[in-house]
Image (spheres, rainbow, N blue to C red):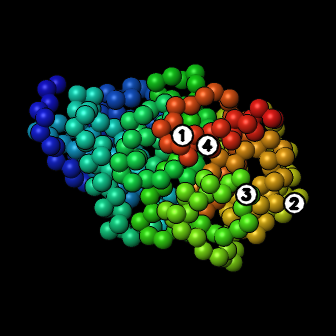
Amino acid sequence: MSINPVTPLIRLFREEDSTGVSALFRVVYGEDYVYPEVYLPTMLGCYNAARHWYSAVAVQDGQMLGHAALWQDKRCSLSAELALIAVHPQARGQGIATALGRYLCDQAREMGLSILTIKQVSSHNHSQRLAQNLGFHTTGLLPDYVTSPFDQTHPESIVLGCLPLQSWPFPELHWPSDWQNWLNSVTQVFGQEPLQPEESVDADISMTNHGRRLEVWVEKQTTERVKEVAELPAHKLVYVKLPVGEGTLQAMEILQQAGFACTGFVPGHHHRWEALLVRGHSKKELTLSCQFAHNLHQQSMFACAGG
Protein backbone atom coordinates (compact mmCIF):
# COMPACT_ATOMS: atom_id res chain seq x y z
CA MET A 1 0.00 0.00 0.00
CA SER A 2 1.55 3.29 -1.12
CA ILE A 3 0.33 6.50 0.52
CA ASN A 4 1.24 9.94 -0.74
CA PRO A 5 2.16 12.55 1.92
CA VAL A 6 -0.84 14.68 0.97
CA THR A 7 -3.46 15.84 3.47
CA PRO A 8 -6.37 13.38 3.23
CA LEU A 9 -10.01 14.38 3.13
CA ILE A 10 -11.66 14.44 6.57
CA ARG A 11 -15.42 13.93 6.40
CA LEU A 12 -18.35 12.27 8.10
CA PHE A 13 -18.82 8.51 7.83
CA ARG A 14 -20.99 7.13 5.03
CA GLU A 15 -22.60 3.70 4.99
CA GLU A 16 -20.37 2.62 2.11
CA ASP A 17 -17.32 3.25 4.36
CA SER A 18 -18.21 0.34 6.65
CA THR A 19 -16.08 -2.32 4.96
CA GLY A 20 -13.05 -0.04 4.69
CA VAL A 21 -13.27 1.04 8.33
CA SER A 22 -13.60 -2.55 9.52
CA ALA A 23 -10.55 -3.55 7.47
CA LEU A 24 -8.62 -0.58 8.92
CA PHE A 25 -9.20 -1.78 12.49
CA ARG A 26 -7.91 -5.25 11.56
CA VAL A 27 -4.74 -3.72 10.13
CA VAL A 28 -4.15 -1.48 13.15
CA TYR A 29 -5.31 -3.66 16.06
CA GLY A 30 -5.36 -7.22 14.73
CA GLU A 31 -8.15 -9.51 15.89
CA ASP A 32 -8.45 -8.39 19.52
CA TYR A 33 -9.80 -4.83 19.55
CA VAL A 34 -11.72 -4.14 22.75
CA TYR A 35 -14.94 -3.28 20.87
CA PRO A 36 -15.65 -6.27 18.58
CA GLU A 37 -18.43 -4.37 16.77
CA VAL A 38 -15.76 -2.87 14.51
CA TYR A 39 -15.24 -6.28 12.89
CA LEU A 40 -18.81 -6.30 11.57
CA PRO A 41 -19.30 -3.69 8.82
CA THR A 42 -23.07 -3.97 9.23
CA MET A 43 -22.85 -2.92 12.87
CA LEU A 44 -20.62 0.03 11.98
CA GLY A 45 -23.35 1.22 9.64
CA CYS A 46 -26.17 0.55 12.10
CA TYR A 47 -24.46 2.30 15.02
CA ASN A 48 -23.86 5.39 12.90
CA ALA A 49 -27.38 5.37 11.49
CA ALA A 50 -28.74 5.25 15.05
CA ARG A 51 -26.27 7.98 16.14
CA HIS A 52 -24.87 5.70 18.84
CA TRP A 53 -21.58 6.43 17.12
CA TYR A 54 -20.92 9.60 15.16
CA SER A 55 -17.94 8.69 12.99
CA ALA A 56 -15.52 10.64 10.85
CA VAL A 57 -13.02 9.17 8.39
CA ALA A 58 -9.84 10.21 6.61
CA VAL A 59 -9.71 9.08 2.98
CA GLN A 60 -7.27 9.59 0.14
CA ASP A 61 -7.59 8.27 -3.40
CA GLY A 62 -10.28 5.85 -2.23
CA GLN A 63 -8.09 4.47 0.58
CA MET A 64 -9.32 4.45 4.19
CA LEU A 65 -6.51 6.01 6.24
CA GLY A 66 -8.17 6.93 9.52
CA HIS A 67 -11.27 6.74 11.68
CA ALA A 68 -12.53 8.32 14.89
CA ALA A 69 -15.95 8.65 16.46
CA LEU A 70 -18.00 10.41 19.09
CA TRP A 71 -19.49 7.70 21.28
CA GLN A 72 -22.58 9.16 22.90
CA ASP A 73 -23.31 8.33 26.53
CA LYS A 74 -26.83 7.04 27.21
CA ARG A 75 -26.58 8.13 30.85
CA CYS A 76 -25.41 11.62 29.98
CA SER A 77 -26.96 13.12 26.86
CA LEU A 78 -24.76 16.23 27.04
CA SER A 79 -21.48 14.32 26.79
CA ALA A 80 -19.69 12.01 24.37
CA GLU A 81 -16.39 10.16 24.24
CA LEU A 82 -13.87 10.76 21.47
CA ALA A 83 -13.00 7.15 20.74
CA LEU A 84 -12.43 4.38 18.17
CA ILE A 85 -9.35 6.14 16.82
CA ALA A 86 -7.37 4.24 14.20
CA VAL A 87 -4.77 5.45 11.68
CA HIS A 88 -3.24 3.22 9.02
CA PRO A 89 0.39 2.39 9.96
CA GLN A 90 1.70 3.75 6.65
CA ALA A 91 -0.10 7.07 7.18
CA ARG A 92 1.14 7.83 10.68
CA GLY A 93 3.06 11.00 11.42
CA GLN A 94 0.85 13.10 9.14
CA GLY A 95 -1.43 14.49 11.86
CA ILE A 96 -4.43 12.43 10.77
CA ALA A 97 -5.57 11.53 14.30
CA THR A 98 -5.33 15.18 15.35
CA ALA A 99 -7.27 16.32 12.27
CA LEU A 100 -10.00 13.76 12.94
CA GLY A 101 -10.15 14.81 16.59
CA ARG A 102 -10.46 18.51 15.77
CA TYR A 103 -13.12 17.79 13.17
CA LEU A 104 -15.21 15.84 15.69
CA CYS A 105 -14.70 18.44 18.42
CA ASP A 106 -16.19 21.00 16.04
CA GLN A 107 -19.05 18.61 15.28
CA ALA A 108 -19.66 18.18 19.02
CA ARG A 109 -19.99 21.93 19.47
CA GLU A 110 -22.49 22.10 16.62
CA MET A 111 -24.45 19.25 18.25
CA GLY A 112 -24.74 21.28 21.46
CA LEU A 113 -22.72 18.87 23.61
CA SER A 114 -21.31 20.25 26.86
CA ILE A 115 -18.27 18.04 27.45
CA LEU A 116 -16.11 15.46 25.66
CA THR A 117 -14.01 12.72 27.23
CA ILE A 118 -11.10 10.73 25.87
CA LYS A 119 -9.51 7.55 27.24
CA GLN A 120 -5.72 7.60 26.81
CA VAL A 121 -3.84 4.31 27.11
CA SER A 122 -1.11 4.73 29.72
CA SER A 123 1.40 2.64 27.73
CA HIS A 124 0.69 4.57 24.52
CA ASN A 125 2.36 7.99 24.49
CA HIS A 126 0.71 8.85 21.16
CA SER A 127 -2.77 8.82 22.68
CA GLN A 128 -1.62 11.01 25.58
CA ARG A 129 -0.03 13.53 23.20
CA LEU A 130 -3.16 13.53 21.03
CA ALA A 131 -5.35 14.42 24.01
CA GLN A 132 -3.02 17.24 25.01
CA ASN A 133 -2.89 18.59 21.45
CA LEU A 134 -6.69 18.69 21.34
CA GLY A 135 -6.93 20.58 24.63
CA PHE A 136 -8.20 17.79 26.90
CA HIS A 137 -7.44 18.03 30.62
CA THR A 138 -6.82 15.03 32.86
CA THR A 139 -9.48 14.48 35.54
CA GLY A 140 -9.03 10.82 36.41
CA LEU A 141 -7.09 7.58 36.19
CA LEU A 142 -8.75 4.23 35.41
CA PRO A 143 -6.40 1.48 36.69
CA ASP A 144 -6.45 -1.93 34.94
CA TYR A 145 -9.44 -0.74 32.94
CA VAL A 146 -9.31 -2.76 29.74
CA THR A 147 -7.53 -5.70 28.11
CA SER A 148 -4.88 -4.61 25.64
CA PRO A 149 -5.37 -5.75 22.02
CA PHE A 150 -1.57 -6.17 21.87
CA ASP A 151 -1.07 -8.11 25.13
CA GLN A 152 -4.04 -10.13 26.37
CA THR A 153 -2.28 -11.10 29.62
CA HIS A 154 -2.03 -7.61 31.09
CA PRO A 155 -4.81 -5.03 31.47
CA GLU A 156 -4.22 -1.46 30.37
CA SER A 157 -4.68 1.53 32.64
CA ILE A 158 -6.37 4.58 31.17
CA VAL A 159 -5.88 8.32 31.66
CA LEU A 160 -9.25 10.08 31.43
CA GLY A 161 -9.21 13.48 29.74
CA CYS A 162 -12.10 15.96 29.55
CA LEU A 163 -12.69 18.89 27.22
CA PRO A 164 -15.35 21.38 28.36
CA LEU A 165 -17.35 22.74 25.43
CA GLN A 166 -19.76 24.54 27.77
CA SER A 167 -19.77 25.17 31.51
CA TRP A 168 -19.30 22.00 33.62
CA PRO A 169 -18.18 23.31 37.03
CA PHE A 170 -17.02 21.36 40.08
CA PRO A 171 -19.19 21.62 43.21
CA GLU A 172 -17.78 23.53 46.16
CA LEU A 173 -17.12 21.20 49.09
CA HIS A 174 -14.67 21.15 51.98
CA TRP A 175 -12.31 18.86 50.09
CA PRO A 176 -9.34 17.41 52.05
CA SER A 177 -6.47 19.87 52.35
CA ASP A 178 -3.99 17.49 50.71
CA TRP A 179 -6.16 17.50 47.58
CA GLN A 180 -6.02 21.25 47.08
CA ASN A 181 -3.07 21.37 44.68
CA TRP A 182 -4.40 18.87 42.17
CA LEU A 183 -8.01 20.01 42.58
CA ASN A 184 -6.98 23.61 41.92
CA SER A 185 -5.49 22.61 38.58
CA VAL A 186 -8.84 21.08 37.60
CA THR A 187 -11.12 23.81 38.90
CA GLN A 188 -9.06 26.44 37.08
CA VAL A 189 -10.22 24.77 33.86
CA PHE A 190 -13.77 23.74 34.76
CA GLY A 191 -14.67 26.35 37.37
CA GLN A 192 -16.64 25.91 40.59
CA GLU A 193 -20.20 26.49 41.76
CA PRO A 194 -22.17 26.00 44.99
CA LEU A 195 -23.40 22.46 45.56
CA GLN A 196 -26.69 21.99 43.72
CA PRO A 197 -29.76 20.14 45.09
CA GLU A 198 -29.71 16.44 44.24
CA GLU A 199 -31.81 15.33 41.27
CA SER A 200 -34.38 12.55 41.60
CA VAL A 201 -33.17 9.32 39.97
CA ASP A 202 -34.70 6.05 38.84
CA ALA A 203 -32.27 3.90 40.86
CA ASP A 204 -30.38 4.69 44.06
CA ILE A 205 -27.68 2.12 43.34
CA SER A 206 -26.70 0.01 40.35
CA MET A 207 -23.97 -2.45 39.40
CA THR A 208 -22.57 -3.60 36.07
CA ASN A 209 -20.01 -6.30 35.33
CA HIS A 210 -17.31 -5.63 32.73
CA GLY A 211 -15.23 -8.81 32.68
CA ARG A 212 -13.07 -8.74 35.79
CA ARG A 213 -14.14 -5.16 36.61
CA LEU A 214 -17.26 -4.38 38.67
CA GLU A 215 -18.69 -0.87 38.42
CA VAL A 216 -20.98 0.33 41.20
CA TRP A 217 -22.87 3.61 40.99
CA VAL A 218 -24.22 4.97 44.28
CA GLU A 219 -26.59 7.96 44.20
CA LYS A 220 -28.05 7.81 47.74
CA GLN A 221 -24.85 7.66 49.77
CA THR A 222 -26.14 6.58 53.18
CA THR A 223 -23.65 5.13 55.65
CA GLU A 224 -25.29 1.69 55.55
CA ARG A 225 -25.31 1.53 51.76
CA VAL A 226 -21.71 2.67 51.39
CA LYS A 227 -20.59 0.11 53.98
CA GLU A 228 -22.30 -2.59 51.91
CA VAL A 229 -20.25 -1.53 48.91
CA ALA A 230 -17.07 -1.46 51.01
CA GLU A 231 -17.68 -5.13 51.89
CA LEU A 232 -17.72 -6.34 48.28
CA PRO A 233 -15.23 -9.22 47.68
CA ALA A 234 -11.74 -7.84 48.25
CA HIS A 235 -10.17 -9.80 45.38
CA LYS A 236 -12.41 -8.09 42.81
CA LEU A 237 -11.43 -5.01 40.81
CA VAL A 238 -14.18 -2.61 41.89
CA TYR A 239 -14.91 0.87 40.55
CA VAL A 240 -17.30 2.95 42.66
CA LYS A 241 -18.80 6.14 41.22
CA LEU A 242 -20.26 8.66 43.64
CA PRO A 243 -22.23 11.59 42.17
CA VAL A 244 -20.86 14.49 44.21
CA GLY A 245 -23.35 15.59 46.87
CA GLU A 246 -23.63 16.37 50.56
CA GLY A 247 -22.76 12.85 51.68
CA THR A 248 -19.89 12.24 49.28
CA LEU A 249 -16.96 13.15 51.54
CA GLN A 250 -18.19 10.81 54.29
CA ALA A 251 -18.81 8.05 51.74
CA MET A 252 -15.30 8.48 50.37
CA GLU A 253 -13.81 8.24 53.86
CA ILE A 254 -15.64 4.96 54.51
CA LEU A 255 -14.46 3.50 51.21
CA GLN A 256 -10.87 4.67 51.70
CA GLN A 257 -10.78 3.00 55.11
CA ALA A 258 -11.77 -0.20 53.27
CA GLY A 259 -8.81 0.09 50.88
CA PHE A 260 -10.31 2.13 48.05
CA ALA A 261 -8.31 4.92 46.44
CA CYS A 262 -9.76 8.04 44.88
CA THR A 263 -8.42 8.16 41.33
CA GLY A 264 -10.15 11.33 40.20
CA PHE A 265 -13.48 12.47 38.81
CA VAL A 266 -15.61 11.61 35.78
CA PRO A 267 -18.49 13.54 34.20
CA GLY A 268 -21.85 12.07 35.16
CA HIS A 269 -25.50 12.49 34.33
CA HIS A 270 -27.52 15.60 35.27
CA HIS A 271 -24.50 17.80 34.51
CA ARG A 272 -22.66 16.56 37.61
CA TRP A 273 -19.25 15.18 38.47
CA GLU A 274 -18.77 11.75 40.01
CA ALA A 275 -15.91 10.82 42.33
CA LEU A 276 -14.20 7.59 41.28
CA LEU A 277 -12.87 5.19 43.91
CA VAL A 278 -11.04 2.00 42.96
CA ARG A 279 -9.88 -1.13 44.80
CA GLY A 280 -8.27 -4.35 43.60
CA HIS A 281 -5.98 -2.84 40.96
CA SER A 282 -2.39 -3.91 40.36
CA LYS A 283 0.69 -2.16 41.74
CA LYS A 284 2.57 -1.80 38.46
CA GLU A 285 4.23 1.48 37.53
CA LEU A 286 2.77 3.42 34.61
CA THR A 287 4.31 5.66 31.96
CA LEU A 288 2.42 8.93 32.26
CA SER A 289 3.22 12.21 30.53
CA CYS A 290 0.70 14.21 32.60
CA GLN A 291 1.82 15.26 36.09
CA PHE A 292 -1.77 15.25 37.37
CA ALA A 293 -2.22 11.64 36.20
CA HIS A 294 1.12 10.76 37.80
CA ASN A 295 -0.03 12.21 41.13
CA LEU A 296 -3.29 10.23 40.97
CA HIS A 297 -1.31 7.07 40.22
CA GLN A 298 1.01 7.59 43.18
CA GLN A 299 -2.01 8.15 45.41
CA SER A 300 -3.63 4.92 44.19
CA MET A 301 -0.37 2.99 44.65
CA PHE A 302 -0.11 4.22 48.23
CA ALA A 303 -3.65 3.04 49.01
CA CYS A 304 -2.99 -0.27 47.25
CA ALA A 305 0.17 -0.86 49.32
CA GLY A 306 -1.66 0.11 52.50
CA GLY A 307 -4.45 -2.37 51.73
Mark seen at residue 177:
3
Circle 2: element type: helix
Circle 1: element type: strand
Pointer 3 with pointer 2, Cβ within 8 A? no
Which of the two discs, 4 and 3, labels the residue nearer the N terminus?
3
What residue is pinned by disc 4? 295
Tell us which disc is closer to us: 4 or 2. Answer: 4
Classify 269 as above or below 227.
below
Which residue type does callout 2 highlight?
Thr
Which residue type does callout 1 highlight?
Ile
- How dense is the environment of label 1, judged by Cα within 10 Å: few (below 14), some, or many (20 and up)? many
- How dense is the environment of label 2, judged by Cα within 10 Å: few (below 14), some, or many (20 and up)? few
Classify 36 as above or below 108.
above
Which of the two discs, 2 and 1, labels the residue nearer the N terminus?
1
Tell us which disc is closer to us: 4 or 1. Answer: 4
What residue is pinned by disc 1? 158
What residue is pinned by disc 2? 223
Classify 100 as above or below 195.
above
Tell us which disc is closer to us: 4 or 3. Answer: 3
Circle 4: element type: helix
Which residue type does callout 3 highlight?
Ser
Circle 3: element type: helix
Q: Is residue 168 visible?
A: yes
Tell me what residue is drawn at x 35 percent, y 48 percent: 133
